[in-house]
Amino acid sequence: MPDTLSRRERNKAATRQAITDAAFTLLRANGPGTFTVEDIAEAAGISRRTFFNYFSSIEAALASVTNGFLDSALQQFRQRPADEPILESARAALMQLADPMTVAPLAELFTLTQENALLSRSELEAWDQCTEQIINAARERLGDNPGAAVDELYLRALAGSVIACGKAAMDVWFAQCGADLSPASLAVLRQLLIDAMGHLGSGFGSPAPAPTATTNPLKERL
């Protein structure tokens, strides 16, 4: 955490993370729909009331895993050069998240929530909520260019497209690799995220040939 955070802010962030970790651990061990807020609170060493000070539901606590990944990507985006094309910055931000330890929680949560409608919806909402953050980050970037008029339609179309590419990469990865969370599988997910942004940057030109039915996409990428 940044050194500028106060002790109170650090404690709040630690408590929030403890709740998320406890919820994720229970989901991993027991599956969706098998534990309660009280179970999470006990595992995190907090009260039920404290849980609701941070999250409105179990689904919201778990979705914070996805939010954390997207927040990291946005932080990387904001560190890119101001004169770099926005889509190139977005692609570079994803490439910076190369460590499987960074992608693994996002991937694992995705695999664990696919058969639960509430959790799947919560995951989608987490991606959708990032749209406004992308709009703000892009607006900040464009606002740094003197005399540049910020086109609101461009911003919103861009943000929506980036989010759609992220969702598409997750769906394709899961269809290809299933619940495999090996480093090789996570490398596939990372590359799919980058490739999806590449398609967006190229204006969705001619697609690459699709793998044949007998092709193992995981082996092909390795």
Image (cartoon, grey):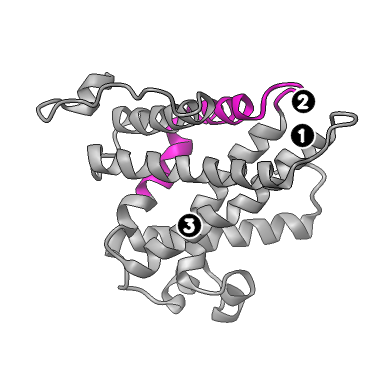
Eye-nearest disc, 1 or 3: 1
Location of mark 2 (residue): 82
Query: From the image, which quarter does the C terminus lie in?
Result: top left
Q: Secondary structure at mark 3?
A: helix
The range drawn in magenta is 80-108
Q: Main secondary structure of the magenta part?
A: helix
Across and down, in percent, residue 62 comes to 46, 61
* Amino acid marked by disc 1: Arg
Across and down, in percent, residue 139 comes to 76, 41
Q: Secondary structure at mark 2?
A: loop
* Amino acid marked by disc 3: Asp
Q: Which mark is residue 141?
A: 1
Which residue is located at x 62 percent, y 69 percent? 54
Tag 1 and tag 3, C-beta contact below 8 Å: no
Across and down, in percent, residue 15 comes to 61, 62
Alpha carbon of mark 2 to alpha carbon of mark 3: how far? 35 Å
Q: Is residue 120 placed above or below 160 in the rendered structure? A: below
Q: Nearer the viewer, residue 182 or 110?
A: 110
Q: Secondary structure at mark 1?
A: helix
Alpha carbon of mark 2 to alpha carbon of mark 1: how far? 6 Å
User: Are there few (<14), some (14-19), or many (20+) residues within 10 Å of tag 3?
Assistant: some
Which one is earlier in the sequence, the residue at label 2 or at label 1?
Answer: 2
Q: Nearer the viewer, residue 126 or 151?
A: 151
Which residue is located at x 53 percent, y 63 percent? 19
Alpha carbon of mark 1 to alpha carbon of mark 3: how far? 34 Å
Residue 21: in sight, yes or no?
A: yes
Tag 2 and tag 1, C-beta contact below 8 Å: yes
Eye-nearest disc, 2 or 3: 2
- Residue 96 vs residue 164: left or right? right
Which residue is located at x 77 percent, y 34 percent? 141
Q: Which mark is residue 21?
A: 3
* Amino acid marked by disc 2: Ala
